[in-house]
Image (cartoon, rainbow, N blue to C red):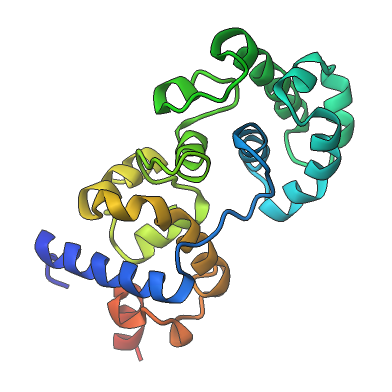
């Protein structure tokens, strides 16, 4: 296939987002939370884990330790007991307690509304910071690249082969999507990845953007 011109890729990306918005609207965060602190904790817990699994443990977790003060005073063992069904629960429990302590000692008990400061919290990387900035503060500073977004970006060839990490994939997406779209892409693509662009069995024939997808075009050529 000939190399796609950047202007054509931007136009294709814009049409993909138009249809995503038509299909999913703004999208919604699938992690249950009530405020920036519980959201941050939930996203930390979601690493290497499904959102559904996180939502099963957070009702009790937030009932007992749903504020920075309560979480900071908790023992790691108490948190582990609640979140033990999740993967990496030992390190996640340590991070949650340290995160809450850091919020109290360095940020006056409030989750910071700043990308760089968020990443100073234990367990918070760029993906988590992006989710918090978008969902809690409505201030997109980037696009959260989770497994769904990473897979879909490459399936649609909006990110090239050299974009082999989440950070590089995010950088590729930021070059073709205007900032007004950054707020919605992660939520929309997560739903899209669950409904159509499923990792092991993508529903390409039923997909509402298959005419814009190089992967589907290649499948059609192979028939």
Residue 115 x %, y %: 41, 28
Q: Residue furthest top?
A: 105
- At x 85%, y 16%, the residue is 75
Q: Is residue 111 above or below residue 179?
A: above
Which quarter of the image is occupied by the N terminus? bottom left
Q: Is residue 60 left or right of residue 104?
A: right
Is residue 5 visible to the viewer in this orientation of the structure? no
Kindly indicate the quadrant of the structure image that contains residue 114: top left
The answer, for residue 56, to whether it is visible in the render is yes
Total numbered badges shown on the rendered structure: 0
Residue 44 in percent (x, y) is at: 63, 35
Q: Is residue 6 above or below residue 35?
A: below
Task: Please tell me which residue is depicted at 45% across the width and 68% down the height of the picture.
Answer: 25
Position in image of residue 202 (x %, y %): 51, 75
Q: Tell me if 102 is positioned left or right of 188 in this view.
A: right
* Residue at 64 percent of width and 20 percent of height: 99
Q: Say left or right for 85 vs 6.
A: right
Question: Which quadrant would residue 121 be assigned to in this image?
Answer: top right
Look at the image and tell me in which quarter the C terminus lies.
bottom left
Residue 4 image point, x, y percent: 14, 66
Depth order, front residue of 163/12: 12
Q: Is residue 34 above or below residue 152?
A: above
Relative depth, front residue between 148 and 28: 28
Q: Residue at x 46, y 28 (%)?
A: 113
Q: Is residue 216 above or below residue 29?
A: below
Q: Which image quadrant is residue 116 in?
A: top left
């Amino acid at each position: 296939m000939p190399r796609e011109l950047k202007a054509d890729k931007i136009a294709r990306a814009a049409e993909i987002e138009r249809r995503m918005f038509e299909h999913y609207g703004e999208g919604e965060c699938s992690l249950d939370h009530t405020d920036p602190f519980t959201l941050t904790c939930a996203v930390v817990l979601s690493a290497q884990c499904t959102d559904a699994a996180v939502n099963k443990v957070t009702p009790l977790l937030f009932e007992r330790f749903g504020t920075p003060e309560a979480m900071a005073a908790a023992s790691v063992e108490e948190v582990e007991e609640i979140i033990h069904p999740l993967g990496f629960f030992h390190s996640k429990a340590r991070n949650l307690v340290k995160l809450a302590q850091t919020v109290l000692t360095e940020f006056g008990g409030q989750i910071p509304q700043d990308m760089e400061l968020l990443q100073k919290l234990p367990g918070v990387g760029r993906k988590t910071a992006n989710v918090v900035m978008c969902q809690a503060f409505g201030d997109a500073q980037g696009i959260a690249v989770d497994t769904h977004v990473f897979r879909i970006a490459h399936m649609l060839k909006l990110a090239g082969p050299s974009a082999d990490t989440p950070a590089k994939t995010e950088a590729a997406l930021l070059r073709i999507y205007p900032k007004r779209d950054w707020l919605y892409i992660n939520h929309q693509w997560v739903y899209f990845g669950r409904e159509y662009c499923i990792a092991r069995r993508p529903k390409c024939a039923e997909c509402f953007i298959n005419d814009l997808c190089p992967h589907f075009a290649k499948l059609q050529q192979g028939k």
